[in-house]
Image (tube, grey):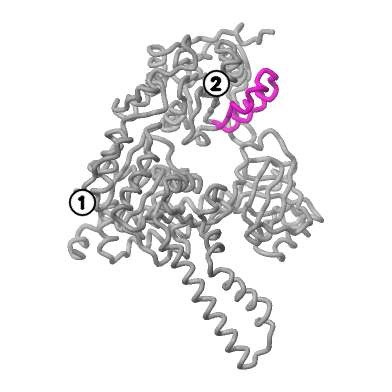
Amino acid sequence: MARYYSVMTQSSQQHLARLAELLAIEQRYEIEQHRRILTPEKLAGPVADSDCRYPVTVDANVDYNPLGQLVMTVRYEVNEDDADSDFEPGCAVEFFYHSNSDGVVTLPHVGHVSRSVPGCVEVVMAGTAAFRSVRDIAASRFIGMRLGIDNISYSVMTDAIASVRRADSDRLVALRETLAGDRQPQFAHRQFGGCPWLNPSQNAAIQKVLDARDVAIVHGPPGTGKTTTLVEAVIETLRRETQVLVCAPSNAAVDWISEQLSRRGVAVLRVGNPLRMSDSMLDCSFERRYAAHPDYPELWKIRRLLREGYERSGNSESTANRRRKLRERETELDMKIVQDLMEQSSVVSCTLIGSAYRLLERRHFSTLFIDEAAQALEPACWAAIAKADRVVFGGDHQQLPPTVKSPEASALSRTLMQRVAREKRQCVTLLDTQYRMNSAIMGFSSQWFYHGRLKAAPEVADRLVSPIDTPLTWLDTSELSDTSNDSEKRTRTGSLTNAQEARLLIRALRDYVDVVSMQKILNERVDFGIITPYRGQARLIRRLLKMQHFFRSLRRQITVGTVDGFQGQERDVIVISMVRDNNDGTIGFLHDLRRMNVAITRARMKLIVVGNIATLGRHRFYRELVEYCSEHGEIVTLRPFETQPSE
């Protein structure tokens, strides 16, 4: 077998070598951007970016979280943009100050976000020395806080690629050649009677998962029950195997599928940083279950003795022997607790990067499930794949790809799932029935992205907010372009806004509520999502909404965000602000059509698009979307006098 694969490895080796180069380019780019973005000129006044705050204040008190870690409280002035903060739990943060002689000085102490609310971030510090250093500097000068670079993730991915390239295990070599080379995937039929509560395509996907010896892909377009299918596939796999590894690129995605498995009675061990887990999964976390083990009190007592007692004792032979025996017992208990927790768990879940966690260093699994695989960087996938005999991808490569910052490394946005789906189509099962959208809202996405194969479940196919409503409306701003000087503009942070379009959107939303009736919307809890490709526009729309007394009673039912922020979410009514409005048809990253696929498929019963058809219609996708809206809904041309609000 090894000789057979040695003939086949050239394409996979070339692919992995190129992957390593792209990853190095991306890391260098991020480091360089991180260094350049903070300049003395920028610190001439307050900074309130999503990933940087200046100045901040540091509380003098020392506090500890439930895990016994030292927590430092950092405060900053609240403004209307705080909904866009990137200071999420678990993110690395660093502190800096401005010196007239040295420029911008970054402190060597890196912390991690424990909790974040507008105006306040709790940061876990490595120890009292780091805390005191930051606190003392903050007491004598202005300091700032910004997100740090996740060098650990780059290290894990780099090591994973190198490890897979030099693999000598027949199984890992077979996987490498199947996923990155020319080897064709193998299948062996396994008996599966089907689940009566699933539709035929979902059952077909589970059958494919069970039959696959190397790789299977559950391709789940919006609303088709991809997570439900994966959960059932995991359960069916566990009828034949004792334990599986479940991963995803983000903690939120890991928590979501882990929670669904736990609700079905599956014993889940959630591995990773507890700071980045949802509250619902903390009881399943390794740390919490470790502390709840019957042997933990003895282990804790031994560690306390070693820390507080014998470490301060003399160096007599008897003391050294007692210390050695305590440490041997400590190691024995630690290994026993870890072994028990592993044996009691049917599913071990973590992020792809978390699969390199020390706890999983020597563990191997028959099957690896990767949820949201279409958003996962390929190098991160290899870190987990190296621990398994076969892999199951779940996701949709027609939705948002992973974020890649360097233009030179843009090829990294092409995921492993996408590559395998295109080159090894026998691995793929498309889930073809969606349970979210009115069939008219679904139709365009189905035609453009899924070869017309999607169908709406009968219970959602004709759903509308109101019987007199239409499922699709495009509000065309073309005739307003020359009547205002506040169409698309670039903000200080580089994002785009379109103030005129934002005001029109607010007015259109108010008119829609009036037509449907406020009472009906409140009684039936109709929820709204306002989506825009640009963060600056999202901030502007939030500000305008806060100024409108009319929407006060609907505040809990309206969410404003970017396309990326709405991935995986859905609302009864979606309103999209397209922003772009210019004479040359420039549409920026609206060229990434997968973004628009996400945006238009968030709506259950009503989709409203606000945009300039003259600008957008030069692109075939948007031109055909306008035509589709005209055929299955309505096009409303807004004219100058309609922009004036009525009393």
Q: Is residue 363 above or below residue 193?
A: below
Determine whether the residue tagged by mark 1 lies in a helix, strand or loop.
loop
- State the residue at coordinates (46%, 54%): 350
Q: Residue at x 62, y 74 (%)?
A: 301
Total numbered circles: 2
Q: Is residue 494 magenta?
A: no
Q: Is residue 404 visible?
A: no
Quadrant location, the C terminus: top right
- Residue 304 position in % (x across, y down): 64, 74
Question: In the image shown, does 464 or 184 lie closer to the viewer?
Answer: 464
Label 2 neighbour load within 10 Å: few <14, some 14-19, many 20+: few
In the visual, does 486 lie left or right of 444? right
The residue lying toward the viewer, choosing from 89 and 79, is: 89
Answer with the quarter of the image where residue 205 lies: top left
Q: Is residue 491 visible?
A: yes
Specify the segment rendered in magenta: 534-561
Residue 47 versus residue 360 in the image, above or below: above
The picture places residue 197, in percent across and down from the top left corner, at 33, 35
Q: Main secondary structure of the magenta part?
A: helix
At x 59% / y 26%, what residue is drawn? 557
Q: Earlier in the sequence, mark 1 or mark 2?
A: 1
Which residue in the structure is indicated by mark 2?
Answer: 524
Tell me the kind of residue under disc 2. Answer: Glu
Q: Which numbered disc covers residue 324? A: none
**Seen in the image, is 257 located left or right of residue 523?**
left
Q: Position of residue 131 (x, y in %)?
A: 72, 61
Count neighbours of disc 1 (C-alpha within 10 A) and say few if under 14, some if 14 to 19, many if 20 or more.
few
Amino acid carrying mark 1 in the image: Gln
Q: Is residue 128 left or right of residue 268?
A: right
Residue annotated with mark 1: 186
The furthest residue to the top: 641
